[in-house]
Amino acid sequence: MTHYHLAVLGGDGIGPEVTNEAVRVLQAIGARYGHTFATQTALVGQAAIDQEGTALSDATLALCAQSDAILFGAVGGATAQLTGGAKPEDAILGLRKALELFANLRPVTVMPALIDATAFKPERLHGVDLVVVRELTGGLYFGRPSEIRAEAEGTVAIDTMLYTEAEIERVVRFACTLARQRRRKVTSVDKANVLSCSRLWRQVAERVAQEFPDVALHHMLVDSCAMALIRQPADFDVIVTENMFGDILTDEASMLAGSLGLLPSASLGTRTTAHGRFGLYEPIHGSAPDIAGLGQANPLAAILSAALLLRHSLGLPDEATAIEAAVAATVAEGVRTPDIATPTSTVVTTHAMGDAVLARIADSLPSPR
Ligand SMILES: NC(=O)c1ccc[n+]([C@@H]2O[C@H](COP(=O)([O-])OP(=O)(O)OC[C@H]3O[C@@H](n4cnc5c(N)ncnc54)[C@H](O)[C@@H]3O)[C@@H](O)[C@H]2O)c1
């Protein structure tokens, strides 16, 4: 029996609700396959500001650094904070930066059973299977200065987009390596017609691509990419892009799958543990204050994030596939949270969706090893 240590940070709003379901699924997989997942929880975001005075305490950061992987929910309040001071979002930005999790993988696939729950014609979704690799520790979200200040002409706001060659190089290399396990096509997305950072991005991407002669590199402007993602989404294989473009494009891409509540993510760096590559796993959605506490949140993105955790950080691909199969079977049988409901489906709560996935894990798994 192998023991794994996981840090579990539910966060705010629907974060704890969906993370609880992911933990229940992990425990069921552990029982079935003979692993123990020792989970340690900690506060982050607004919950931590309220109780500990900071969005991410040193103790929580240390707990994360010592774990084999982190399961994260979401942070954030009902309104964006316009003044200075501690912000809930500092927790996730701080974790990414401190743990050097520079590559954020966001796979987008379309479950056939959910095509009716999307806004698209079925033929447009045929063959959609793409991964966005979003650069996670640079760009506008980290550049300084970033502030609102009084000037003689009135109040001004400034943000700074900054990328080093090394930051671009490592994430493009990561994307090209990933493409080798897929359809060997990388679309590098930038705004090179306007931004200096994007012009450097394009040059570096060209140079890195020379190390991968078997991978086809294409460049696309971010505005064109936003359109092409809707027009011909099946053409994409791996998309690599800077931090903010990746943030926005993946919320758009979640509509191909049917809901923000379906897209998992893995944030990885270069550090490894005894079991695999250290990482942080979270749904791409936020804390969804509009539905927090109502039992309406879709936990499948969090559950699928747990599957990515098993695959990338713990070296347990069969267990990961078992979760993905259980999720697909659940939605194929018409079990739906409100965000992916159709007139003929059975609408369930967050917890009942977790129960439904657990039941399919119990039903469908092969005998334990
Ligand atoms: N990594 C993170 O922790 C993260 C990511 C994005 C946003 N945020 C924060 O979350 C807060 C709310 O942001 P927002 O409203 O713009 O984005 P959001 O992703 O929280 O919600 C956008 C919309 O999608 C719906 N939605 C999101 N997740 C869902 C789920 N699992 N099931 C069903 N519906 C779901 C919400 O109800 C809402 O209508 C903000 O404070 C923002 O900063 C945090």
Image (cartoon, rainbow, N blue to C red):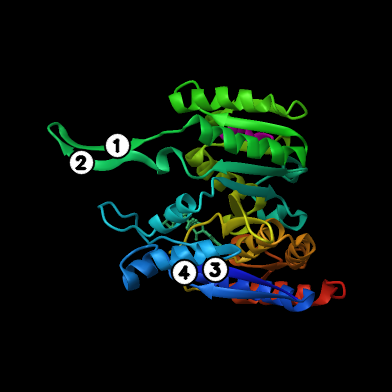
Alpha carbon distance from label 3 to label 4: 22 Å
Callouts 4 and 1 close, C-beta under 8 Å: no
Q: State the predominant SS element of the stretch in magenta.
A: helix
Quarter of the image with the N terminus is: bottom right
Can residue 230 be seen here? The reply is no
Residue 65 placed where, x, y %?
Answer: 52, 61
* Point 76% across, 58% down: residue: 113
Callouts 1 and 2 close, C-beta under 8 Å: yes
Mark 1 neighbour density, 10 Å: few (under 14) some (14–19) many (20 or more): few
Which label is found at residue 208? none
Q: Earlier in the sequence, mark 4 or mark 2?
A: 2
Which label is found at residue 292? 4
Task: Give the number of the mark in front: 3 or 2.
Answer: 3
Task: Give the number of the mark in front: 4 or 1.
Answer: 1
Q: Amino acid at mark 1?
A: Ile
Question: What residue sits right under mark 1 in the picture?
Answer: 158
Q: Earlier in the sequence, mark 3 or mark 1?
A: 3
Q: Is mark 3 within 8 Å of ligand 1?
A: no
Question: What residue sits right under mark 2 in the picture?
Answer: 149
